[in-house]
Every structure is written in structure tokens, then in C-alpha cells.
Image: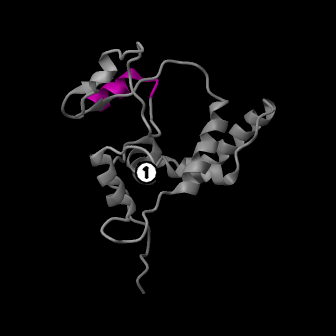
Amino acid sequence: NNRPDSWPIETKNTEHPRSEERTKDFLMRAVEKNQLLKNMNEKVLLIEEVLALRLITGPLWEKYSAVVRGGSLDGWNHEFMEHCFFKLCGGSGGRAEPNRYTTTIHILSSGLIKTSKLSVVMDVYRGFSGARLSASFWHKDWTGVRGGVEYNFMSTTTNKDIAFHYARGGGAGTI
């Protein structure tokens, strides 16, 4: 019998609130969100959307991230991001086509659009370290625009201390 007696115990990020949350609790909160959406005469979340939203809060975030950052079929891919995409999603070296998680990412996008109806305007922060913002973030182009576009699903926080925690992770930090 090759089946384990129990699921492996989580050893990384065990202090993270997500590690204590069970799927049952997540589903119960989805029922509450659907009631709020109904009250607003908006479309409710389908179970597929709820499950996709749950999947992105765990290890699959890395694969979905690799697809949207480095798996473009008709656009430019940064060389490092494209390498990550093939490493995580397969398809390089004459193997089969890589998994682009197309259906899941579309369902996830649909769920995010629906839940965005419940959002309120507020300041949010994102802290990161070990990377630099490109010159286009600091200097306006010929149209007067500066900044950038993140192709990935981005996590943010309303707690500045949490953003600073991530910014202190190593290397130059940015909030």
C-alpha cells in the first residue's frame, strides 16, 4: 500500500493565518459573500469560482503566476519569467505542450470580478524586496505616464507593518 496514513504536516509559514483556515470555513464565508451579492442584485459566485479562489491562496499561486507572467502565446515574455513558466508548467525540451491552466485562470478571473463588487475604496500596500522597479516607474514617458503593469494576481494589505515585513525580506525593499 503506497498511500500515506495521513496528510503531511505543514512546516513552512505555519504562523500565517491561512494555515489555520479550513476549507469548510472558506466555503461558509463564500455563502455569506453570495448573500451580500444577492442583496446587491449582482451575480453570485459559482462553486467553481469559490474553489479557484481557494486554490490561488496556496501553492498553486506559483504556477498561475508563472503562466500570467511568462507564458504569453502572442506577447513578449521576460526571459527569466518564461524560464519559470516552462520549469513549473512543463512543455520545454520537446515535451508536451505546457499546462497554461486556462480554464482555472478564467474561472478565477470571473470570481475576482464578482467579489470586487464587494470591495470598498481604501489604501492598500504591497511590500517586496530583492528587486528594483524599472526606470519607467520613476520617469515619465513621452505621454506623461510613469509606472508599470503587473500581469499577476497581486496580494496587498491594509496593514503597513505587514508590507514593511515583506520589504525587509532581503535586498532593496519597496512599499
Above-or-below relation of 48 to 146: below
Q: Mark 1 points at which residue?
A: 67
Residue 28: x and y in percent read: 66, 46
Looking at the image, what colour scheme do you see? one colour
| Residue 152 lies in the magenta-colored region | no
Q: Nearer the viewer, residue 111 or 103?
A: 103
Above-or-below relation of 85 to 36: below
Residue 72: x and y in percent read: 43, 49
- Res 160 quadrant in image: top left
Which residue does the image show at 69% across and 38% down from the upper left?
A: 33
Which residue does the image show at 35% across and 23% down from the upper left?
A: 161
Which residue does the image show at 46% across and 45% down from the upper left?
A: 18
Indicate left or right for 83 with 147 as reference.
left
Residue 171: x and y in percent read: 18, 32
Q: Which of 127 and 6 is in front in this view?
A: 127
Amino acid type at image mark 1: Val
**Which residues fall within the magenta stretch?**
157-167
Secondary structure mostly seen in the magenta stretch: helix
Residue 84 appears in the rendering: yes
Indicate left or right for 87 with 48 as reference.
left
